[in-house]
Image (spheres, coloured by chain):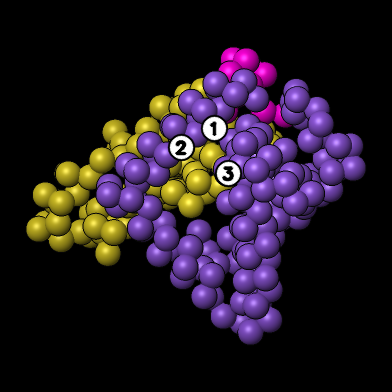
Chain colours: A purple, B yellow
Amino acid sequence: MSRNKLYILLAVACLVGYSWLFFNYRSGTETNPDGSGVCIFKEVTHIPCPSCGSTRSAISLLHGNMTDALYWNPIGFLLGIILVVVPLWLLFDVVFQKDSFFRFYKKSEATLEQKKVAVPLIILVLANWIWNIFKAL
Amino acid sequence: MMNSKFFEGHHLSQIRDRLIAMDESKWGMLQTLQFKDPTTILIVSILAGSLGIDRFLIGDTGLGVGKLLTCGGLGIWAIIDWFLIMDATREKNLEKLQLVLY
């Protein structure tokens, strides 16, 4: 994938992410235990997927409820950080015509493919998934 | 071209020319290449696309993580990928082949 393609994709993703958050923030998804119902996996199997609850987690973060955010889904923290950092980094790269984010992306892809990094992360995601199922998100 | 299903149609003639012009010493390396079958990846994409497994399999780790964290891009990206993943697989196969050919 080329630099520009990645940047456009990420910019669109961040935009969709922010509008999704805004939409859910206004409709008060946090208080609705059924979530938003877009997850195909959950609709088909009635089992929550590994990232179910991250919208509620991010909304809790916006309200400043750290413990709630952690309870809904720790992935919400990760998404929150990405949503803050990525647009700024992209803007920096575009303004100064650099490709520092692109190089970082390629490097982290290579890191993630190493077994000693991948296996612990897979276990972490699986553990989080099992927790999700127990919480019945 | 018994491996033609692994690549996009418009690349085939180019690949054929390259193979004919290729140095004989690279043949052994070429034989060891493992290509991903687009149909298999499509099945994975339909079954586990919202977890990003299809993207991980073809080596798009970054996009795979993105799909996993966002529940298949709110389900929309997962559906779009049902249509994109076969061509993406063929692209990846070509990249793999190019590493040996050039």
**Mark pair 3, 1: CA separation:** 9 Å
Tell me where residue A108 appears, x and y as whole percent.
42, 60
Please say if the residues under marks 2 and 1 sit with CB atoms less than 8 Å apart.
yes
How many numbered marks have been drawn onto this rendered protein structure? 3
Q: Which residue appears at 63% of the width and 65% of the height? A: A85
Tell me where residue A112 appears, x and y as whole percent.
38, 53
Q: Which residues make up the magenta segment?
A: A38-49
Residue B73, image quadrant: top right
Q: Sort mark 1 into few (<14), some (14-19) or many (20+) by Cα contacts within 10 Å.
A: many
Q: Which residue appears at 61% of the width and 50% of the height? A: A77
Q: Which residue appears at 62% of the width and 20% of the height? A: A136
In what element is the residue under mark 2?
helix
Q: Tell me the chain of label 2.
A: A
- Residue named by callout 1: A50
- Residue named by callout 2: A125
- Residue named by callout 3: A75
Quadrant (top left, top right, bottom left, bottom right) of the C terminus of chain B? bottom left
